[in-house]
Image: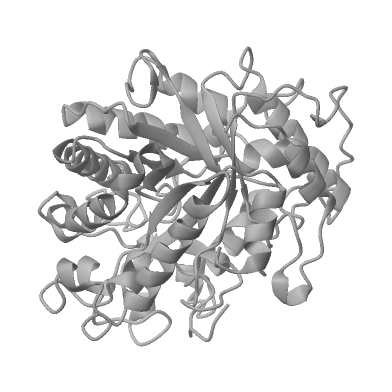
Amino acid sequence: MGSQRHNPLLSRRAFLGAAGAATVAGAGIYVLPRSGRQPAGPGATASGLRKCLSMGPLDTPDNDDQDLRRSANVDLLTSTHSRWVKVWARWDQIQPLPPSAVEFDRLDDPEANPGQPFLAALDAQVRVARSLDPPVGVIVCLWRFPSWSNGTGALADGEGGDLDFFPQDRLKRANFEAGDPNASIKPLAYRVPAREVLLPEGAWGRWVDFLYRRYMRHGEAVALELANEPNIQWWPQREPSGGGDPFQQGELASARSAAVMMATAQEIAESNRERMLIAGPGTWDGPKGDPSVIGDSRLYTDYATFTEALLDELEALGFSAGPQFVWTQHNYNDTIYRHGVAGAPRNRAAHARELLVGRWDGYGRAGSPEVWLTEGGADLRAKLVAGDRRKQADLVRENWDRMADAQGDGAGIGMVTNYLGYSAPNFDTGLRDPLDAGGASRPVEATWRRLRSKR
């Protein structure tokens, strides 16, 4: 994972490992009953789904285990007939210095921009995907905020006054009150910048414009996904309530920020004649269990509350989605807990899509928006999986079958993604073991290969 010094939540792999462990924790061991449906074989009719494989974010610009340029990753992508791949554009890596020091038109200059190697790595991964036969579509996910953009430049994760900086937005109340120095805390790079930074003329807007113009020649073969799990990663999730208790819950700041960012991206797309796809918000489909019972938190927002609040905020802005704007969500919980089968809670991807009908006019037929699930999978650490690799494969297959059923929960679902190809140490959803552990194939790889996709 590189030599970067970090606290337990500094990198995506560590943060989502912790979040994933909390999300998938359950009570007892569950034996998965097999459904009557069989995996799609070579002669099966292709479903309407796109099949996407997600790489993980890079910790180093050269020879990272998650780099698509590594031959093992290319082989895994092509041998499983995954026609889309997800890669990551970390803003804090690619543009570590503010525009006042290095303007956007100099980000390609290795002498001016210390982050140029990461930009080159991103470009190279897109080229690899598009040069395959047949060419593979690419989702470029925008992630993290550089310290110069969000007011954290004087701080460092895990050092100095870090734990004293807005702990109510980053730390569980119990850990704060106990003064626990080892508690996991949201990293500084997840702090959302001020509104003016998120506007088209702001630094984030210019970042989106930079990437849009860079990749728009690929048209619908590349999508810019504007955010990643804003309802759990970003902070603040909620505005201050105005009371004396800083941990009280106020209005949903994360949805307001996401709405501004989506409006900014739509304006940039229109100024460039909407020549490529944009996507978002990449909602986390948690928490585990019934969100209405669990309630709200200063640290996260359940998928349904966030989706409805975001739609309200977009409506308040007078926003209208263009035809190239794809709504995205994740579906880890749907996969692990078999949401949608008889006796289980409703499928969350299907529920989110229902919330969009009549309120979102983006990608898809008029009045029938299409949702892409840009992450998902069955983590071997989940208690319902209990390290059983065959059960992992069965859960992934069952999820695909549900999402492929256009007359059921799959109505309006246009993509299913497995995160990852090769597992990472803190997120064990891969089709294969981690590369540094030998990269052995798991049963889920053969299952994923047999799933017949649209394109």
Identify the coloring.
one colour
Q: Is 141 positioned to the left or the right of 109 in the image?
A: right
Image spot of residue 103 (x, y percent): 14, 71
Image spot of residue 346 (x, y percent): 63, 24
Write the residue at 23% across / 60% down.
Answer: 193
> Is residue 378 visible to us here?
yes
Q: Is residue 133 above or below residue 404?
A: below
Write the residue at 89% across / 31% down.
Answer: 34
Write the residue at 24% across / 45% down.
Answer: 261
Residue 35 figure quarter:
top right
Q: Is 139 positioned to the left or the right of 206 in the image?
A: right
Number of marks in picture:
0
Q: Is residue 43 above or below residue 128?
A: above
Image spot of residue 10 (x, y percent): 47, 72
> Is residue 384 visible to us here?
no
Write the residue at 23% across / 51% down.
Answer: 213
Q: Is 427 positioned to the left or the right of 155 in the image?
A: right
Quadrant containing the N terminus is bottom right
Image spot of residue 402 (x, y percent): 69, 25
Residue in front for this viewpoint, 71 or 35: 71
Quadrant containing the C terminus is top right
Residue in front for this viewpoint, 116 or 194: 116
Q: Is residue 353 above or below residue 133?
A: above
Residue 301 figure quarter:
top left
